[in-house]
Image: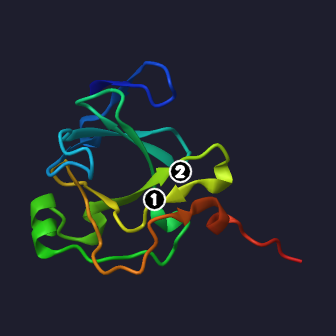
């Protein structure tokens, strides 16, 4: 267990995180190359998760499993990424997409072009920038999650 300081809700909070929820990102996330250690914070049954920097408590990203709102989401990891992350089978990886939050929840978007891959084997993480992808950079999450009511 590790104690992690976060400001994810605007005020200082210290949470305990299992060691298997700590990931080393090399290289760092796009635009945050100087930060390499992150903890995955999960709150109960909520589909929203956080990727909290262990190097700086003010750096925290909101993320979500893309299959919840985009069931056919998929991409291939390169052999290099699989080997470096320790991902030998699909179930070895957790795939998440970073969210951009807005004042209105309906405006929340997910970045499908640069998913986060967290390895269950060895605590490595990486942001994968999908080259030549048709996937959107800003996908409206909650619009996609709406299910039509049956008549």
Report the quarter where the N terminus lies: top left
Q: Residues within 10 Å of mark 2 (few under 14, many from 20)?
A: few
Establish if 97 lies above or below 144: above
Q: Nearer the viewer, residue 64 or 35?
A: 35
Which residue shows up at 51% across the image and 74% down it? 71
* Residue identified by numbered label 1: 65
Confirm or deny contact between disc 1 and disc 2 (CB under 8 A).
Answer: yes
Q: Quadrant of the C terminus?
A: bottom right
Q: Hey, which quadrant is residue 144 in on the image?
A: bottom right
Is residue 10 toward the left or the right of residue 17 in the image?
right
Q: Position of residue 60 (x, y in %)?
A: 38, 37
Q: Which residue is mark 2?
A: 47
| Cα–Cα span, label 1 and label 2 | 7 Å
Say which element carries label 2.
Answer: loop
Q: Residue at x 51, y 28 (%)?
A: 9
Q: How many marks?
A: 2
């Amino acid at each position: 267990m590790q104690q992690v300081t976060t400001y994810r809700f605007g005020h200082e909070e210290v949470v305990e995180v299992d060691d298997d929820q700590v990931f080393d990102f090399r290289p760092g996330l796009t635009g945050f190359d100087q930060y390499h250690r992150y903890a995955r914070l999960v709150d109960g049954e909520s589909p929203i998760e956080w990727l909290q920097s262990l190097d700086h408590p003010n750096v925290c990203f909101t993320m979500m499993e893309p299959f919840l709102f985009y069931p056919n989401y998929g991409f291939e990891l390169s052999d290099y990424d699989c080997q470096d992350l320790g991902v030998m089978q699909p179930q070895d990886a957790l795939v998440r997409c970073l969210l951009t939050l807005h004042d209105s929840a309906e405006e929340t978007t997910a970045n499908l072009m640069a998913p986060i891959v967290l390895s269950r084997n060895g605590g490595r993480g990486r942001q994968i920038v999908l080259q030549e992808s048709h996937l959107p950079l800003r996908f409206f999450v909650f619009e996609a999650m709406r299910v039509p009511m049956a008549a």
